[in-house]
Amino acid sequence: MGAETLVNNGEAKAPLILGLQPAALIDHVARVDWSLLHQIPGERGGSIPVEFKELEHILSELKKHILTSVDDPSPMKTMAGGSVANTIRGLSSGFGVNSGMIGAYGDDEQGQLFVSNMNFTGVNISRLRKKTGPTAQCVCLVDAYGNRTMRPCLSTAVKVQGDELTKDDFSGSKWLVMRYGIFNLEVTQAAIRFAKLEGLSVSIDLASFEMVRNFREPLLKLLKSGDIDLCFANEDEATELLRGEANASPEAALEYLSKYCRWAVVTLGANGCIAKHAPEGMPLYLVTNPQLGKLSEFRL
């Protein structure tokens, strides 16, 4: 499978932050009623892979179940997606941080849309490889409360492999941002090796509670390696991380993560998050107040 690397404007300076998303992904995001979620296999609010026929079936059913809103007249949004891509795009367009992507996209309409979306928001795309084959897609079903149920189709999608990475992909950058995934473990480990050789700090998020539940041992090995500097988990992922322990609270998960990572963050939904920087010892609570629309912080 051949690959070609993109070049865009403003490539002289290496991105401060790099995102590794082996497979470029297009999100189809729609607000839907509960009845569609009842028809889809898997737990609500999670993320499990589906085959292309299942993806097509879900997309075909969307029109019957979309929730309309005067505040959001567009029933469905189709855009470049994936946790890492969303983070990198937000850093670039929202905060003006020089950010770039490492990954691969297909020679199809979805691949071109991914590249166009990322380039438009100022993301450095010179480390994206174009390959022959389809681009990954994901249906993102949002319920009335804002909870998201993800069904990605990745099995046939093109992606960058570990042996395709080079030190030049990482040279000059400061941070590598990744998402934990068992199917990308080989390229993840290769990226970490290059990142550490080039002096980058490494950040990872735990992807989904299903991923932590089903592939907990490789995750624990990765955390205990000491190569992860910053780890993000939500409440459900934190619970799965400590499954079987007497205390599986977000606070306990924060303490566990901070044993192996310099920084640890556990998000608490509408209640904000808790974070800990290992040398400081005490956790920092960032708590949102929906009524005041503000963020407060305090230490225990």
Image (cartoon, rainbow, N blue to C red):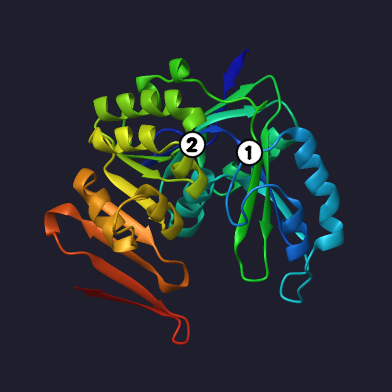
Mark 1 Cα shell of 10 Å, populated few (<14), some (14-19), many (≥20) = some
Residue type indicated by callout 1 = Pro
* Residue at image location 81% in from the left, 55% down from the top: 62
Q: Can you say which quadrant of the picture contains the N terminus?
A: top right
The quadrant holding residue 296 is bottom left
Residue 153 x, y percent position in the rendering: 67, 36
Which residue lies most toward the bottom here?
A: 291
Determine whether 50 is above or below 206 in the image: above
Question: Who is closer to the viewer here, 95 or 152?
Answer: 152
* Residue at image location 44% in from the left, 86% down from the top: 292
Foreground: disc 2 or disc 1 = 1
Determine whether 248 is above or below 230 in the image: below
Question: Who is closer to the viewer here, 62 or 125?
Answer: 62
Residue 234 x, y percent position in the rendering: 42, 57
Determine whether 168 is above or below 278 in the image: above
Q: Which mark is residue 49?
A: 1
Q: Which residue is mark 2?
A: 101
Q: What is the total number of numbered labels drawn onto the structure image?
A: 2
Which residue lies most toward the top here?
A: 1
Question: Who is closer to the viewer here, 231 or 72?
Answer: 231
Residue type indicated by callout 2 = Met
The quadrant holding residue 146 is bottom right
Q: Is residue 63 left or right of residue 46?
A: right
Q: Secondary structure at mark 1?
A: loop
Q: Can you say which quadrant of the picture contains the C terminus?
A: bottom left
Marks 2 and 1, Cα distance to the nearest angstrom? 23 Å
Residue 205 x, y percent position in the rendering: 41, 46
* Residue at image location 73% in from the left, 70% down from the top: 72
Q: Secondary structure at mark 2?
A: strand
